[in-house]
Image (cartoon, grey):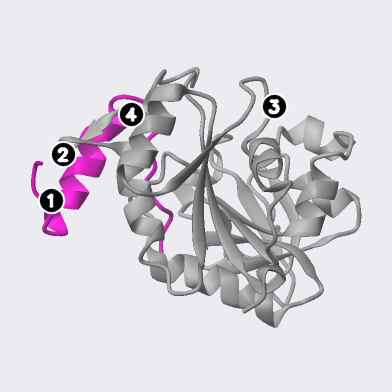
Amino acid sequence: MSGSDRVLGVIPARYDSTRFPGKPLAEILGRPMIEWVIEAVRESARIDDILVATDHNKIFETVEETEAEAVMTRSDHSSGSDRVAAAVDDREAELIVNIQGDEPLIDGSTLDRGVRSMQENPEAAMGSFMAPLNDEEAEDPDVVKVVVDRDQFALYFSRSPVPYGRDTSPERYQHVGIYLFRREFLLEYSQMNPTPLEQAEGLEQLRALENGRKITMVEIDEPTVGVDRPEDVGTVEEILRRRGHEES
């Protein structure tokens, strides 16, 4: 396989999270969260290499202890996608999979489905995931909704309960924020100016749609469980215990 055909998994791991400072180093069953994420990505059969993009020496050192590769990036990147773009600027790859550093429960087979969708839909500049949305979450602006066409390409993302459903009860989907990019588009995307709908909704993926690019969406059974706040650690630990993991 040539370098240009490779699939690179990149994990942005910023230290100064507003809700949870030092989050990538938070202990989950006795191990730093970033280790769990790396281990999960290693289960993917379609990701050829893993790179962690961070802005903190301790995270860098922790990643190297797992024998994964880390690269230092600036602390002032405005988004995870910008951090990923900086990390891959000098790397050869066809596809970049952006796996958030607070997703310790992500499944390698799920990532493989996303990669396969990008490979089967060469017209897509990006890919992502969606899961069925229940009625209780439809009104929650923190839960991002996505509307797709018949070929599973995204039409729109919103914090509002779309589609409306005037005379029917339409099936709604929530967006699961793991992204796949064609490398050349990622580098272009990181240089694009913010767009009106992106700014109105506070959703950076709308930048791609507003510039006429396609996003292929893969449906999964349920959303992933990430770690946004310290209280989420206990929930993740309980799920890991049910999967057979024990305290280190």
Quadrant including the C terminus: top left
**Residue range (magenta):** 220-248
Tell me which residue sits at (29%, 28%) in the image: 26
Q: Amino acid at mark 3?
A: Ser
The structure residue drawn at horizontal position 79% and vertical position 31%, both measured from the top left corner, is: 200
Secondary structure mostly seen in magenta is loop
State the mark number for residue 25. Answer: 4
Viewer-nearest residue: 127 or 163: 127
Mark closer to the chain start, 3 or 1: 3
Q: Which residue is mark 1?
A: 241
Residue 84 x, y percent position in the rendering: 64, 43
**Residue 14 vertical position relative to residue 47 in the rendered view, above or below:** above
Q: Is residue 238 magenta?
A: yes
Between 140 and 165, the one lying in front of the other is 140
The amino acid type found where label 4 is placed reads Leu
Whichever of labels 1 and 4 marks the residue nearer the N terminus, that label is: 4
| Disc number placed over residue 78 in the picture, else none | 3
Q: CA distance from mark 3 to mark 1?
A: 35 Å
Tell me where residue 71 appears, x and y as whole percent: 55, 38
Callout 2 crowding tier (Cα within 10 Å): few <14, some 14–19, many ≥20: some
Which residue appears farthest toward the bottom when viewing the image? Answer: 120
Find out whether the residues at labels 3 and 1 contact each other: C-beta distance under 8 Å.
Answer: no
Going from N to C along the chain, the mark reached first, 2 or 3, is: 2
Q: Secondary structure at mark 4?
A: helix
Q: Tell me the number on the disc at residue 29.
A: 2
Amino acid on which the number 1 mark rests in the picture: Arg
In three-dimensional space, the C-alpha distance between marks 3 and 4, rounded to whole angstroms, equals: 21 Å
